[in-house]
Image (cartoon, rainbow, N blue to C red):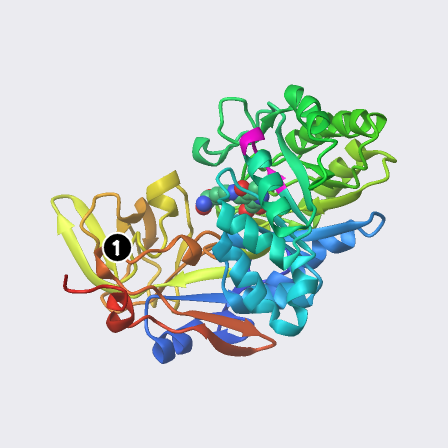
Amino acid sequence: MQQFENESSRPFTMGEGELCCGGVSLRALAEEFGTPLYIYSADQILQRAQLFRSALWQRTHTVCYAVKANSSLAILRMLGEQGCGFDIVSGGELARVLAAAGEGRAAEWAARTVFSGVGKTAEEMDAALSAGILMFNVESEAELRLLENRASAAGVRARFALRVNPDVFAETHPYISTGLSAHKFGIAIALARHVYVSFATSQWLEPTGVSVHIGSQIRQVEPFAAALARVLDLVQQLREDGLPIRYVDAGGGLGIEYADAHFDAREQVARYVASLQQALGDLDVHLLIEPGRFVVGQAGAGVPRVVYNKHNGEKKFVITDAAMNDLIRPALYQAHHEIVPVVQPASAAVEIVDVVGPVCESGDFFAHDRTLPVLEQGDLVALLDAGAYGQSQSSNYNTRLRAPEVLVQGGKARLIRRRETYLELFAGESLG
Ligand code: LLP
């Protein structure tokens, strides 16, 4: 097994026969907080965000962390304190950003927040207008009309960007690709100029930027540059039309390595930023980017315990106490997550197994036909690269409690979310 610790790959290392995160034993954390649990390296999260910021030093920019990737308050606070902005997609995520900021800083953090998503409601718009967010990334004419209406009711001007659909293909899983006209996202780039111009005289709308997001887990940088080049043409046209476009939002989407293969995060960011810079040329704009997965994905691991081993005919199943409700990515996107034992097994023997959870669905699996060291009942394993879209996509399906989260920083671990209780789960229900 390769070593997982350097700023380029994963913050998990085998030290003295045990997997550690920043010097802290995962076994000790599992014993203290129970399983399944999520463990994150704060150091790596901060390093990753900093990689983008350093690479962009020559240009006015804001790294708007995509809250959906991992929306835990402690992580938002840490990133906000480092100077990051936020990309939100719901009133709930706005509330999280404001809670993470705390009262004294709420206005300042809101001013670094952009609001994306195809279905913003009037209530969500009102909350974001009242918080004073940087801008709305608007995805349809109907949404722009509602925004104008809400801004007028609040007596404030709403800053907005149209999220354009550049019709650029980026290779990724079809469920997380967004930049083609076949997708529900954005306004066709060919129509965007017309929409901007037709709202130009509105007293309540301020055309502030143009935004684009072509999808997620994109490993090549060329599609980002291609999309941005189209955006730039539009910015130039809009400026000729007299619109004061100051921001270009390039979205998120830069992918990570999920396999057990070499990955150099610094080099990836350098290539990504170079391609954005090349597309932008000397255009004078404030660049926003919305990375999510790249910042938190490799910093996190899910840690379940093996509950049973079981044979069905030829097939062997390793049943863990984590399930698809804790990490749905394999079930939803056929995603690959490396699985490693937390304590180095005494024997080098391996076997081919399915790693599954206790939920009553065949889709409840973490790996099919995976060659792994022989795992015994009670052993701990780590599901790697689970920091993004792991906990944030978890649910209570099968009335399972969502896992706690632990953040490791400077060699110390702290619980940032405790395990739920059944009473909390039932709190909103009545017996009718
Ligand atoms: N900005 C917008 C407008 C987005 O829709 C997304 C992700 C991001 C930024 C952040 O993208 P990232 O840098 O994380 O790739 N649950 C899926 C991924 C869904 C991504 C949705 N949008 C998964 O687990 O792979």
Give residue 315's position: percent from left, percent from top. 18, 45
Q: Which region of the structure is painted magenta?
A: 137-142
Side of 5 relative to 366 (left or right)? right
Tell me the SS state at disc 1: helix
Q: Nearer the viewer, residue 19 or 409?
A: 409
Q: Is residue 183 above or below residue 336?
A: above
Which amino acid does the dot numbered 1 rest on?
Tyr
Q: Nearer the viewer, residue 272 or 353?
A: 272
Q: Nearer the viewer, residue 220 or 92?
A: 92
Q: Residue 139 colored magenta?
A: yes
- Taking the spot 49% from the left edge, 50% from the top edge, the residue there is 123
Q: Is residue 150 above or below residue 280?
A: below
Q: Is residue 139 above or below residue 431?
A: above
Write down the residue under mark 1.
Answer: 397
Image quadrant assignment for residue 101: bottom right
* Residue 184, visible in the rendered structure: yes
For label 1, the crowd category at 10 Å Cα-Cα, with few meaning under 14, some 14 to 19 and many 20 or more, is some
Q: Residue 206 colored magenta?
A: no
Q: Nearer the viewer, residue 89 or 366?
A: 89
